[in-house]
Amino acid sequence: MKTKIKIVTLALCAFSSAVFASSFPSKPINLIVPYPPGGAVDPIARLYAEKISQSWGVPVIVLNRPGAGTTIGLNQAARAEPDGYTVVLGTASITSNAPLYRSLPYDTLKDFTYLSMAGMIPLAITANPRTAVDSMDELVGQLKKKPGSLTYSSSGNGTIIHLGGELFKSLAGVDMVHVPYKGSGPSVMAGVAGEVDLTFDSVFLMDPQVKAGKLKYIAVASEKRLKSLPEVPAIGEKYPGYFVTSWVGFMGPAGISADITAAWAKEIARVAALPDVSDKLATLGVESVSSTPQQFSAFVESEIRKWEKVVQDAHIPPVQ
């Protein structure tokens, strides 16, 4: 009798789970953005929210929850019910925060369901026109001859851009001085003004300055050359394995069912493939992409491991 009851109970659980998944979504969805309104990530979230709402027939409400290096919004998402109705648009900062912050309120690998990537943001190294290097070989040569003789700006201590510069130093066996700024805008303008020799940031922000003759490309921060900049060499061509990118992706709390996870991944892939979405994202400096949940979680884990080593090797102090 106990065996029969157990079988019936399992069957009912499976049935109710299937019914729940098949009815998803049936109420408004909250999309948390751990950045302020009007920032670089906000319009990406609103574009996806609009398209998903149109497809699924339910409101997708964008909730801006900035603060504490994105941990406030991410923690709210991690503590939500794992029913698929609360998700967060995470960014590359989660992978750099993991080895830097001693007391995160969540476990980056265990407390989230990774649904799909949604966009990649290419990065590059540029130089002020007055800086006496015009190529990666010249840059490395200068730093080999005179270690620490050049400065590079980033959007802040502990950011992906900062760590990307440290990774370059490690692979090239050179030293240059990091000058952090409060955000990408000030960092790029410091390069334009000649306050620093080099600037490490997004292609999107720096390309207009390059076209205006106020900066010059040294290399893109990828394994291969970008289709949009085929004439600019990739750091990975000289130093295999070098790959640094900013990105955005959809995440939810741990424990979302496989069916609902799959529904999210399928919908994000559909939206990412829409020509108007791809075109709009391109105007924001974002390459439209998607992934399976497994690919996304594996990528996040590999990025965390990479940055753990960079933080350790560069002796970057942890954030309390």
Image: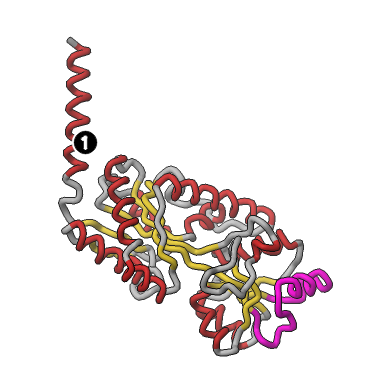
Please tell me how many numbered marks the rendered image carries: 1
Question: Badge 1: how crowded within 10 Å, few (<14), some, or many (20+)?
Answer: some
- In this picture, which residue range is highlighted in magenta? 127-151
**Residue occupying image coordinates x 39% and y 68%:** 41
Could you say where residue 131 lies in the image, as x and y percent from the top left?
71, 84
Which residue position is annotated with label 1? Answer: 17
Furthest-right residue in this view: 145
Q: Is residue 33 above or below residue 205?
A: above
Could you say where residue 200 lies in the image, as x and y percent from the top left?
60, 72
Residue 69 seen: no
Badge 1 amino acid: Ser
Q: Nearer the viewer, residue 58 or 146?
A: 58
Q: Which of 133 and 109 is in front in this view?
A: 133
Residue 269 seen: yes
- Along the horizontal axis of the image, is 295 left or right of 229? left
Q: Is residue 120 above or below residue 303?
A: below
Magenta span contains residue 150: yes
Q: Which image quarter holds the C terminus?
A: bottom right
Q: Is mark 1 on a helix, strand or loop?
A: helix
**Residue occupying image coordinates x 75% and y 70%:** 140
Q: Which image quarter holds the N terminus?
A: top left
